Image (cartoon, coloured by chain):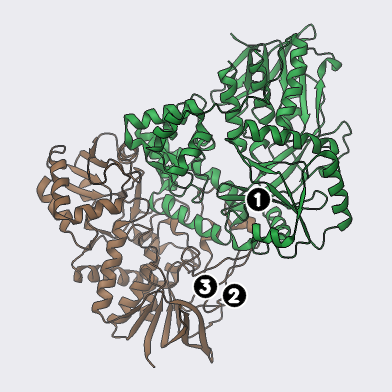
Amino acid sequence: MEKATVVVIGGGATGVGILRDLAMRGVDVLLLEQRDMVHGTSSRYHGLLHSGGRYAVKDAEAGRECIEENKILRKIGRHCVEATEGLFVRLPEDDEAFEEKWVEACLKIGIPAVQIAPEEAWRLEPNLTHQAKSVYRVPDAAIDGFRMAWQNVASAKRYGGRLKTYTEVIRIEHSNNQVVGVIARNYITGEEEFIACDFVVSAVGSWAGEIARLAGIDVHVQPDRGTLIAFNHRLSSRIINRLRPASDGDIFVPHGSITILGTTSSAAKQPDDTIPLTAEVVELLKIGEATFENLRDYRMLRVFSGTRPLYSADPTAKGRGASRNFVILDHAKEGLNGFASIVGGKFTTYRLMAEKMTDFICKYLQVTAACRTADEPLVEDISPQLLAKARLYFPSYGTNLAVSRLGGAGLERVVKRMEKDPEKSQLVCECENVTLAEVEETAHDGTSFTLGDVRRKTRMGMGTCQGAFCTYRSVGALEANELNFGKDNIGLFKEFLQARWRGIRPIMWGNVIREIELTRGIYDGTLNVNGAIEHEKR
Amino acid sequence: MRKDDVIVIGGGFAGLIAAAASAKRGKKVTLLSFGMGTLTVGSGIVDILGYNNDGTAALTPEVAVKMVEDDHPYHKIGLQAVKESVEFFLELCREEMYPYIGSLNEMKWIPTAAGTLKPTCLVPKTIDVARLKEIDTIYIVGFHCLKDYYAELVAKNLKTSLGSDNKYEVVMINHQFSGGRDVTILDLARWLDSEAGRAAFIKELQGKIKPGAVVLIPPILGTAPDYLVLDAVKKATGCHFIETVTIPPSISGLRLRSMLINHLKKMGVRMIEKANVMQSILEDGKCVGVVTDGIDRERSYYAQSFILATGGFYGGGLISSELGEVDEPIFKIPIQIPITQEKWSNLNLFSNEKQPFAKIGIRIDEKMRPLDEKGNLLFENVFVAGRNLQGYDFCFEKSGNGVALTSGYQAAMSV
């Protein structure tokens, strides 16, 4: 029988934060995620590490937490944070009185907002609209949600933390008002198992209501939909925010070679209400054009949606009006000991949320170890010898990317594969510099059950060509190495491209429609994937 | 000022065929091209029709052509012209000493790089699948450092698509010319262009395959439109070689393009590259000329008739710059489109019906002339051919290059 002292439900930012914190404090902890890691909100957002400027006026507490956590994550998350800095830009239509309030609020909270002349802003960011009235520099940063999560997991594993993906919790078992374990179902095989534990923590964001209901407890989380656009270019070197009360479509975040624009805000029907709509995209473009007038000249890569887990004790608060603070709900109040939910909050403060939650659990378990997650880097230092070896096989830029994806131990295993067979250093995905050795290593890591899992961990297929070339290469490479996840490989083609299609379908104009004609031409016109599927059906 | 009988706009397969057919009729022809068309992206073979409307496999291309819906280009072109265009193409290939094989009465199921089979009609001799059914030993040749082709994938899926009774054996070839770096299919085809490369390849093969078998190979049998490499490897090994169709770049498409360009040169067609046609000059409901922009200045080209073969969305013949808008940039021909963006496409990328956006295009009459929304003729002397036509989804029905061939031919004949 599987056993753990604490079961963490939810493989998003908060969940992995708690996993790492508990493991570092010596608690036996197991994380259960219903699908793949960060398949929910933690990967469906801007990838913005807030400076706090966004919240400064409305919510000083949230702003203060952001700037503190921002400083910490830059330090511990060197391999998932890109310290781009950010600009707050006020346009003619934005309220001047708000600017005064904002400057004052930033000063009070301790967010270093430095005013620069618009001319200086245009020199730094030539694409920025020349309508800008005033501009401030703030320490915003870009953060990669996938990487951050896996780096937390890798760090937790070094301390004995465990995780199971594709494992849904379907019941919370208790006896005498005390949690004794959970029943979990494997999403792929359908098998159910009992996992004994002393404490269950629900860190499931938008799904908090669903999990609490398993124990017959009510938690009011209102999932709020946000849609975002990924552009195939870096529109700016820095993050660009509109200097106005938080609203739709006013943040641009550059990541590697792309930029993400978001977001919209509307009540979601359910936590996984994440199919983006054309109308949302049109609205985003309209607003975004005020900041970058030539926005429509850039090719969109894809669009995606996520749901913010807005929590309010007051069930009538909606959208951006609701607080972004987090709350720990001790369900002992409802008469069940050993069960708590953490709700609300935002990505930037995930570590702080995890720390508070872990403090709470440790107090319950009478563990006295202190939190060290703010001091120890997520990725251990890579030895110069290993880096030098890796550079023999990776393209120069690719080495750094590989370090950030794989960490030291992973990189070492990948380099070993390449030393054994130099052919494995070939790039399966040229857009994101992903080598065959890395694809193989990732497929073998024990938490990859679909090609999509490999994609999310390596970024294969997530770049410029959106799978047009690397789908064939990756399916072929996996098949050649007898790694097809026990699936028919035509199904793998279909699954991989369908995942891309979800984000392409709502934006079929401009170069997007050209790209999809090419992709279809290859996979249907030439390789007859559709015909093969129909052939198998018959 | 030069005035042509026909100006063909577009250097893809439809444009090249339209120019060739016009020249054969004794017309004075200028071909304006910008870029290479999609012959090197697709696979140098001519699919006429592989699947019926409901997604069932067609018996023969001819049977399928007879059953198309009214808005399909084949319906406008008519079976007779489809037949003529196929004959025209086969004869052209024979003349150029690079004969193609196939007929409208036979569906050829050819192996792909994914190990699936794909229905097609006209293929070069390097894709002659006649022996595939008779011989049960099939070698699947792959190459080290070639990431665009996986022999193991082909072998595994052929067991399903072709039958599990055959003996499939993967043979990996060491080319040793790249020093360990990635190679492309084009690198390998160039390697076989050279005598030394051919000799090295044949030597590698001879140790690994037995005579009398079928050998499946990526499309690397030389870059030139001839069968020199095919004949050499056949003779040296005693095996039947079949090239599979692969992801781009397509070498068989490159060969076909070279052959057609050679042919047009011989026929005296004036070819102007980097000619980006920006607009047309219209007088009294007729087009008298077109204007290109160049690095130095605009240039005007005049002719009696014009064939518009600028491609679809991919090629730039149709442009959708905004949500729910589609423009044909040169003649501003109005294009009918589905009402809402959500109706442009199916929920699934691979589904058992045509993608609505793939059917967006120019509406034409029987003479391939453009019509407006109400069905009125727009220009008497403008003819349309290729991917910019309305009413077909070449990916779904497998009519890639087929509509281009037949409509290019028919446009030329209608002038």
Query: Residue at 40% of width from left, 71% of height from top?
Result: B407
State the hue of chain B: brown
- The quarter in which the C terminus of chain B is drawn is bottom left
State the hue of chain A: green
Q: Are dots 3 and 2 on a single chain? A: yes
* Amino acid type, callout 1: Arg
- Pointer 1 residue: A238
The image position of residue A315, as x and y in percent, is 87, 34
Position of A29 with respect to B205 (left or right) is right
Whether label 3 touches label 2, CB < 8 Å: yes
From the viewer's perspective, is the residue at label 3 or at label 1 nearer? 1
Query: Which comes before the other along the chain, label 3 or label 2?
Result: 3
The image position of residue B45, as x and y in percent, is 31, 59
* Amino acid type, callout 3: Arg
- The quarter in which the N terminus of chain B is drawn is bottom left
The number of numbered discs placed on residues in the rendered structure image is 3
Q: Nearer the viewer, residue A329 or B401?
A: A329
The image position of residue B275, as x and y in percent, is 42, 77
Whether label 3 touches label 1, CB < 8 Å: no
Q: Nearer the viewer, residue A474 or A529?
A: A474
Disc number for residue B363: 3
From the viewer's perspective, is the residue at label 1 or at label 2 nearer? 1
For disc 3, the chain is B
Which SS class for mark 2? loop
Q: Are dots 1 and 2 on a single chain? A: no
Badge 3 local density, few (<14 within 10 Å), some, or many (20+)?
many
Question: CA–CA distance between discs 3 and 2?
Answer: 8 Å
- Pointer 2 residue: B373
